[in-house]
Amino acid sequence: MPINSICPILLETLPVPTTIICWSQRLLTGLALGLVATLNTQAADLIVGDQSYSARTVMEAAGVLKDLPYELEWKQFTAGSPVAEALNVGSLDIGLLGDSPALFMGALGAPIKVIGVSRQNLDGVAIVVRKDSPIKTVADLAGKKVAIWKGSFSQQLMLTALDRAGVARDAVDYRYLSALDSSHALDGGSVDAIATWEPYVTQQERQGARIIATADGLIPAQSFIVANDQAIKDKRAQISDFLQRLQAARAWSVSDPQHNEI
């Protein structure tokens, strides 16, 4: 599933749960004046934390990573919490993650800033059950085993859906698993339902699994692009260039439905 929109914001901006729909004029002006010269004289590596190859795949498919004037190193994660932790200790320059891990880490005083906000396709964040499951609605989850990941879209969606359905939160038996492990657990029958996100929702659907609820109408499912403070100071030009390329890739991904089959 594609991300519907993405827009970088001022590199000094603190985490905020809002969707920004235009480029910062200050950022563009700085790029126009000094990007090429800076990159030519300081070709430092940029280390980016991705989740399950989602950003890397679409950027490579869109062809926006050609002729990079700096070296790009990808590190892959299966959830947002470890991305936030890696940003906190400085092993990443940029991380792509959901809003909860970033806001939680920022509230603890981590040296990070939100530099971009995007909105997920809300159908790509969902509660999923096996195709032969007797579970038809969220109300049927009472007394069932469900897999979620703490501090993620998964936990937000599950708890909000239970509240909306009038099911007590403690009426469900939780298993705290990563998105990848959750999918395996659902396949193996050790849990009755999972709350997860892309690409796992689509993978499960292709195996015949059923969606009983999505983020639509329940949670905003915003994603943040977060940078480490030191990287903002030392690699501003590289970060700005990467954001432009990522935005171009996202635009390409929604320009043709076939692009979402990658």
Image (cartoon, rainbow, N blue to C red):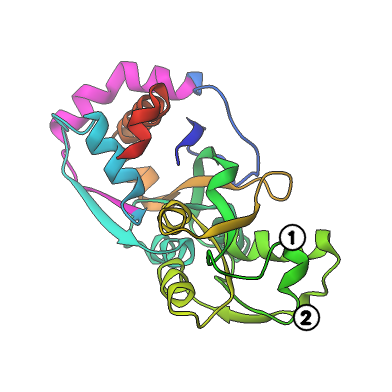
Q: Classify the position of the N terminus by image quarter.
A: top left
Q: Quadrant of the C terminus?
A: top left
- In percent of width and height, residue 261 lies at 34, 38
Q: Where's residue 2, x and y in %? A: 45, 37
Q: Which residue is mark 1?
A: 161
Residue occupying image coordinates x 24% and y 35%:
61
Left or right of residue 170, residue 125 in this image: left
* Residues at marks 2 and 1, CA–CA distance in whole angstroms: 13 Å
Judge whether residue 31 is colored magenta: yes
Magenta stretch? 26-49
Q: Nearer the viewer, residue 221 or 33?
A: 221
Find residue 16 and report its horizontal and vertical position in percent: 64, 44
> 192 or 173, which is in the foreground?
192
Q: Would residue 259 appear left or right of 144 to someone viewing this image?
A: left
User: Where in the figure is residue 153, as x and y percent of width and height?
Assistant: 59, 58
Residue type at the position of mark 2: Ala
Q: Is residue 21 above or below residue 101?
A: above
Looking at the rendered structure, the kind of residue marked 1 is Ala
